[in-house]
Every structure is written in C-alpha cells, then in structure tokens.
C-alpha cells in the first residue's frame, strides 16, 4: 500500500455543550494542523499516488471554508459539538466528495490506472500533546 | 475509524541482558515520550472518541507508576529486558485493564454508544531517531 | 549563559481590528504552544538554572488564566489586538512579576547564588509555520 | 502487533517527466528523512522486535547507495519518475531482500521465535508539509 | 525584543567543490525548510511586529526564485559553493533588500512606529539533524 | 553572524541530591537529544562555517564517552548533580577544548580565514516539554 500526505492548517473559535468538556464549554478556539493522507495499491502511469499539487489545493480550499470562523455560528454545525474528531470526519467527507467529483483528477477515481485511491485519513493536530483523526475507504460507502 | 491521541512522558533507568544489546547492557536510562491512541468506529452522544481529560489522567497515572525509577529493581520486571517495545506492551496492558474497569467512563466500554473503544496503540518515542509501539484490540483477548 | 525551557499550551478565541488582519478580523481562535526559557550566568548550589517543577507550575497557572477564554471579552485586553506577539509580552510580564515576587524561589532572584535569573524569553507557537516571542532582561526595567 | 522504527536521511538530485509535475520537471533535489518501521506479532527471546543496531546499519547502507547522487543518471531508474512514493517502494524492496537474506539476523526471518517480522513500512519525509510511504507484508510476495 | 517567525520550503540540486565536501562533491540536492524571523523593539499601532501575510508572501516569492532549480547553473552563484549557510545569507540579503524597498509595509522601515524592524534571522533546516542560519541587523550595513 | 547546527543523542542513568529534585532523587535516566550550534562572523574560503563532517564526528565522540552510562558512578561527576544544564556545560567545555586542539580543522581556530568560530551553544532536549542549554564564546575564557 502506498500513501502520500500533505499538511496545512486552520484556526477557529467554538464552544462545547456537555459536562464532560469542563472549561471547554466556554467560547475558546484552536489551531488545527491538518494531515491529509491518501492511499492506493499501485502507482499510476506517472509514478504517483496523486497529483500532490491538486491534493494541496483541495485541502487548502476545504480548510479555507472553515478558517477564521466561529463554528458555533455555522448553520451546518447547529446542535453539534465540533470536537477535533468530529471535524476530522467533516473534512474527510468533504474531501471524499471532492475526490469522487474528480477534483484530484481521473487517476484518483475507482477503476483508474492502479485502481485509484482506496483509503484516506484526515488528522487534526490540536497541540503538541493531542490529535484526532478519521480514516475510511474511498469511495465512501452509503452511511459512512 | 476515529482516533484520539494524548501524549505524556516518563524517565527511567535500566540495563539489558544479551549480547545483542552491546553497550546497552550497562546501566543507562531513557526518556520515553508516550503517545496513547484510542480508536472507535462511531462517536458517542457528546461527539467524542473518549473523555480526553480522563484519558490524559489515566496515562499520567500509569506513567507515574514507572517514572523516576530503576526498572532493574522493579519486581514485576524481574528476569525481563525492559526494552522499548516491551514497555509499550506493559503500558498497553495496564491501560487496557483500566479501560475495562471503567476508568475512561461507561462510553468507552464495549456495547456502549458507538460501541465503545475497539483498538488502542501505545507508542514510546525514545529519541529523535527511534520509537516502538504496541497496538491491539479492546477489550483485550485472553492471551493477548 | 545557561538556559532552561519548559513547554505548555492554551487555547483561546479572539478577533482583530484593522485591515491588515484580513479574514482574521472575524472571531476565530488559536492553540498556542508556549515555550518559557529562563537564563542565568551561573548555576545555583543545586546545579540548576531554576526549580523546573516551580517553573512548570507557574507557567501552567499563568496559562490557565487565559485558557478556554474569548480574549475579546477580557477587560484587561479592551481596545487591544491580542496578537501572538502581544500575548507573548503579556505572559512575559506576568511571569516576570511572579519571579520578582519569589514564585520561582529565592535562587531565581537578583543577587542570589549565581546571581539569579537575568533573561527570559516567551515564545508562542501558533501553527507548524508561525510563531512569535518576546524576550527581555530580569528583573524587568521600568517601561519595559 | 509490535513495531520498531529507526530514522536516517539521504539527499539526491532528480527531475520528473510529465505535465503533472509542473516546475518539478526541472532538475532539482530533495532531502528525504526516512522512517523504517518493522512489525511482528510477538517479541523474540531477547524481548525485541529486531536488533535495532542491525536495522540502523541496514537502513544506512541502503540509503548510502542513493545518497549524494543524481537519480536521473542511475541506470536502475532509467525511464522512471523517482517520485517520493516510488523511492519509498524501492527502499522497501531493497530492505525486504536484505531481511530475507538474513541481514537483520535469524530472529527476523519467518518461522523464527515469535514468527519473525511480518510487516514493514518505509516513509520518506520530504518537507515539513509532505511525506510518502510504502508498506507491505514480509516476506514479500511474488509480484509485490 | 519581539520576534515573529514564518516558515516555507524549497527544493534544489547542486554540487560542491573542495575535498572537505567528500561525496557531496557529486551532484545531489536538498529540501530546505526555511524560517524567517523578524525582530523589533516595540510593536506598531496594530499590535504587530510585521504584517504576517506580507512576510509570508515575500518569503514565498524569494524561495520561488530558487525552487526546483539546479543552483550549479544559476549565473549569480557561479564559482561559489551554495552551502546551506551561504544560501541562508543569500536569502537574508534578498529579503533585507525587499524590506528596505517597503515590501513589508511602511511600519517595517527604520524610524517607523516602534522604530521598525531591527534584526532578522534566516534559518535553513536541511534534515532532522542539521540546519544553518544567518542573522544580522536591519537595515543592512554596507559590507554586511 | 552565521551558525551551523548538528544533532545527535545519548542515554544515561543518574540521580540527584537535594529536596528540590523530588522523585528525581531516585535513580532514573534520560535520553538527551543534543544540538551543537557553531557560529562565526564570516564564512571560510570553502563557503562554510565548519566542516560538518568533522563537527558531527566530534559531537558523536564526546557523546559516546557519556552514552549508556550511570553518571552517578563516573568519577569526574563525583559530588555533582548531573542536571541537564550542568551536562550542557560539560559537553560545551569538552567540545571547546577539542576545537582549540584543532579537531574541527584549522579554519575553526581564532585568526583563521573569516576569523574562525567565535560562539558555541550546546542544547540538551530531554523531553517534548523541556530542554536546557549552555552557550559561550570561543575560545573559552579562563574561568568560563
């Protein structure tokens, strides 16, 4: 199995609901340094897992949609705790949809040369002592 | 699959028996920076893999039992080489027992919301060029 | 010159005023991984720059006063942009006052064995690509 | 599953063919910081995954064969793009062959105490924002 | 003294002349992860050392002029060994000239609010075990 | 001012005397990842601060003299607490003596081309949250 990883970051405000979160129930924020890892069984004809320029661009675009925002005010997260692990899944789903729509090129699709991308992992590093991630198969299965 | 990781460290003295260890047969020591990674298939009702405060506390307690000690004098390690990979397993087993006893809360148990924690990995980083880990399923199987 | 550094972190929300900040004028947040570096010319009688346990505790206490807060609502920052470099200075000043009040012990004071602490640097790492710091002499001079 | 990782690096020049590579079609170069991760199900009689001294030496030898070279002029890479992921596989294959030839000692072989090494991962870190890896089972299967 | 640091990277090929370089006399290459640290005595009216967006942009532009190139063929380096420390100085000089020309805005100039930028350090990290840097005062003095 | 840094590590056992050390009064140990930073005002004729191969070798030799040892039993440390900052100074002094004896070559000596090495810093990273260093001028002054 081959893998390629690209890294970027975003900075947000949010708060959590539930006694388990203690002082994190107050409005606070975080820097998330994000690793996007893409995997496939065989390389394509260019000798790559994915066009790293496109992967970097798609990651930057998806993080830009969240960057410098108060997640408590984003309608799509209403009623949800935007924990690190929850956000890892949100970014996974958004990028998986972009991959399925061809944003990483035709070689990234199922059935392409080398059979395309088959797995993905999104990791959010939130400090020097904590991170969370979500990984799953590509293309996404109905119901995740 | 979701994962959450917390990090802490401990510092010990020890020596090894066996020609394979060369100068490490002498009494020496190490700083181990420990990563505890906990995984589950679905988030609980709070949107988390685990109560990160409890996970941090359990990791700190288990490392405190080893910290600032000469492992050659610990009865539980008599006749064993306390290599990095061996210690990764020791810490895995101790934390797995704590999880099973409810130390990470009821949501971490098998059958809980989101089915609880199903995998764990303990990594001991011993320098900028070497680390070792042990990973396995939760709850632990008889015989490991 | 000797130096000792301890590290901890805090997570806050804030926003900035001024066109130079672009999208960071929106309410967002950050994780700051903080390095506290303490320097002196000679070691004390125990062979140390500072009691590392006390230094860790003082750093934790000062960061706790900021942690999990929206800095826009803190009265002491009214009318100020709480930039990374500004916060580095805030933390420097607060810890310098603690040092002067004896929080790091008598050996840290001017005129102590080895002449005590003479310099300090506070660095706030805000992502994998950016950090800011403030450094100065101890004891603080009037007017900074 | 146990794992041990050792790290070293090498520095090469190369160029790529294909529009997907953009300016990387020009002759340029890279530092690759290489992680070699070796895995097995049970420890050997010494309590180790592998003789870390031998693993370090084999990694150094295989990287030395590539270090300080222009890969465009190496006959074994003629007609191939020596991408990060391609090189991860090259190094995987070379070290897997060394393992099979006994370079990591008899305990690393299939059927040895603890059943020997069963998996390996080679990761090439090429910058603070990108890495690639290849992982597979040991011993290598025909056709890889 | 305040400081702000931004980070980026570039990848080049080159060779060295002189027996001291051993195998690095062959054509090879490197990834350089570059830290640009800018310092000033007092913050400007916005509460910043420098417009971090402009600093990031200027660093990226100067690295782009070197990125994905064979430095042996760059006329400006003819007859010079493009060592890590030499390149740190090259980038220092180029960015210092950009600062003097106003690329980081009027507040970065000598005599500006807070007296502008007074020191700069450029560090090139070339592997996990080696880096080099050049630091000096701003504005640059004749003869460097 | 130019600087070059090389990194290596060593692993030791020791204990401390004095109530300030708390549980670290017990026999324990540490991994120290060591940064050796060498500085000079101008490059030599080869375009370097120092022969990085020699610097790496001298660092390795000096760390080898300490590596895999119980410092409590080393006669040269009798009656001393071998704290991280104390060890930084020990290694500084030993390498400074090697530099003065020509171990880094004639270009590293005072009065050489570019005036040789003028400053040195030795940093011992003992965990992900703590380090200590000693820096001073070269050649060493009597009385340090």
Image: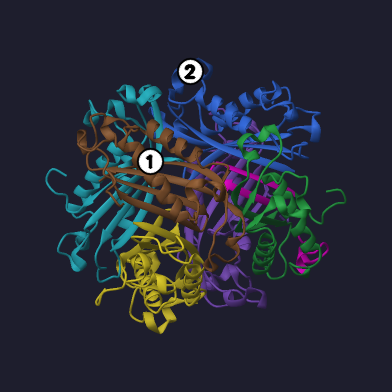
Chain colours: A purple, B green, C yellow, D blue, E cyan, F brown
Picture residue at 21% right of the left edge, 34% below the top = F112
Badge 2 density bin: few <14, some 14–19, many ≥20, Cα 10 Å: few
User: In this rendering, which labeled residue sits more in front, label 1 or label 2?
Assistant: 1
Disc 1 and disc 2 on one polypeptide chain: no
The picture places residue A24, in percent across and down from the top left corner, at 58, 74
Helix, strand or loop status at disc 2? loop
Question: Taking B131 as reference, is D138 left or right?
Answer: right
Please tell me which residue lies in front, E67 or C100: C100
Circles 1 and 2: CB distance less than 8 Å?
no
Name the residue tied to disc 2.
D74
Pointer 2 chain: D
Mark 1 belongs to which subunit? Answer: F
| Residue D53 on the magenta span | no
Q: Residue at x 52, y 35 (%)?
A: D8
The label number, if any, that marks residue F95 in the structure image: 1
State the separation of the CA atoms marked 1 and 2.
Answer: 40 Å
Q: Nearer the viewer, residue C106 or A110?
A: C106
Kindly state the secondary structure of the residue where label 1 is placed: helix
| A125 lies above or below B103 | above
Decide which of F49, F142 is in the foreground and name it.
Answer: F142
Q: Residue furthest left?
A: E142
How far across and down, in percent of the image, does residue A35 sit? 55, 50
Vertical relation: D111 (above or below) B77: above
User: Residues in magenta?
Assistant: B107-135
Q: Residue furthest top?
A: D75
Q: Is residue D130 above or below residue B47?
A: above
Q: Can residue A103 be seen in this snapshot?
A: no
F35 vs F25, nearest the viewer: F25
């Amino acid at each position: 199995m081959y893998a390629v990883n690209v890294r970027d970051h975003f900075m947000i405000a949010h708060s959590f609901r539930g006694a388990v979160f203690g002082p994190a129930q107050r409005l606070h924020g975080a820097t998330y340094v994000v690793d996007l890892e893409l995997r496939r069984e065989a390389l394509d004809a260019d000798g790559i897992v994915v066009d790293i320029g496109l992967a970097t661009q798609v990651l930057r675009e998806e993080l830009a949609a969240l960057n410098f925002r108060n997640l408590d005010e984003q309608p799509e997260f209403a009623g949800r705790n935007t924990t690190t692990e929850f956000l890892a899944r949100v970014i996974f789903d958004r990028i998986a949809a972009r991959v399925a729509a061809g944003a990483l090129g035709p070689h990234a699709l199922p059935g392409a040369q080398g059979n395309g991308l088959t797995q993905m992992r999104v990791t959010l590093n939130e400090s020097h002592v904590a991170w969370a991630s979500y990984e799953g198969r590509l293309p996404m299965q109905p119901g995740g």
